Image (cartoon, helix red, strand yellow):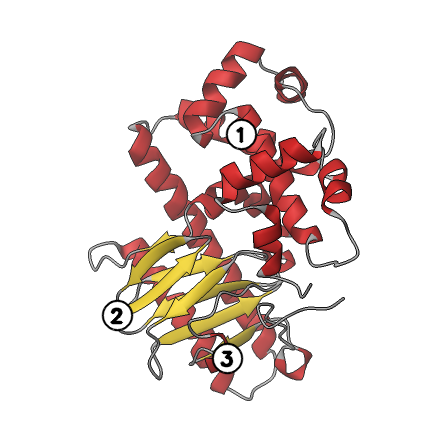
Amino acid sequence: MLLDNHFEDLTFSEDRLINTSHTVARAYTNLVHWHPFAEILLSLTEGNEVELNFRKYEMYPNDFIISYPGDLHTIRNVSMDSFLLVQFPMELITVVPDFNRIRQLLEKTPYCRYDVNDTQIGKMVLTIKKIVNSTRDPGSFREAYNYSLLLRFFSYYGKWCLENSIDETETGNDTYYRSAKLMAEACLYISQNCTEPLTVDDVANKIGISRSYFSHLFKDYIQMTFVDYLTRERIRLAETMFTDPRKKFIDIAFECGFTSISSFNRSFRKTKGISPREFRSAMIEK
């Protein structure tokens, strides 16, 4: 596989699962890049800018942003010691069913603005700093300690995302949580079976509700239609195949569940804002 300089290939030090740093690699500053691991970026200064999947975020002290495997992102205006970084394989998180059920919600909320009055955000920021600072401790079981902190961070983060989602819908009762659980199960089922010719009836039957109620609930909770979400999951899968230069676009299209190359190209441009060829050029050498 030929990977160009837009791919950040990182070997974690001492074969550890969690990598931390007090600096951003200069080679990837102001350069669009991606990597096969997840990354938490905590801003320490003003004036930092992160562009994630073509959306720009202006970063202030203690703001943090999470990029997931395959996300295209750029870090700009970086000075020395302006970020703390935590990098890890996504499997460390998705092995826990709780996080799998709300993964869609987590990925919808990659950025968190620091609020001194929000104790939940304060806990998340403190936990990130603990993970990075613990690397200075040469003691045994440091990796296990960092892993426990990482899980703690995502438990805070998951609750925060759910609470903010509740605020947006102005509902905080048991009905919301039951609906959220159903939609999380639906999203997981769609993601795992997106290469199949799924229909609304298939997913509604899977989670045990009517077609009409599912359509209403899905649009309300996910903020997109079933077809749009299914298309997005297929495109997400396609992105992971772009790194193999031997794979043709038409093969990728059919393997990901599209019925034609034209529908694949049209859907990809609508979702990502650029063509599959343009996206791939940012990932692999021709």
Q: Nearer the viewer, residue 229 or 174?
A: 229
Q: Quadrant of the C terminus?
A: bottom right
Identify the residue shown where x is 21% and y is 60%: 116
Amino acid at pointer 3: Ala
Q: Are marks 1 and 3 in contact (CB under 8 Å)?
A: no
Amino acid at pointer 2: Gly
Percent position (x, y) of residue 251?
78, 42
Residue 283's quadrant in the figure? bottom right
Residue 228's disc is 1
Residue 47's disc is 2
For mark 3, give the secondary structure. helix
For mark 1, give the secondary structure. helix
Percent position (x, y) of residue 266?
57, 34
Left or right: residue 216 versus residue 250 is left
On screen, 213 above or below 156? above
Residue bearing mark 3: 27
Extreme residue toward the left, this view? 117
Identify the residue shown where x is 54% and y is 72%: 145
Amino acid at pointer 1: Asp
Mark 2 surroundings within 10 Å by alpha-carbon count, few (fewer than 14), some (14 through 19), many (20 or more): some
Residue 178's disc is none
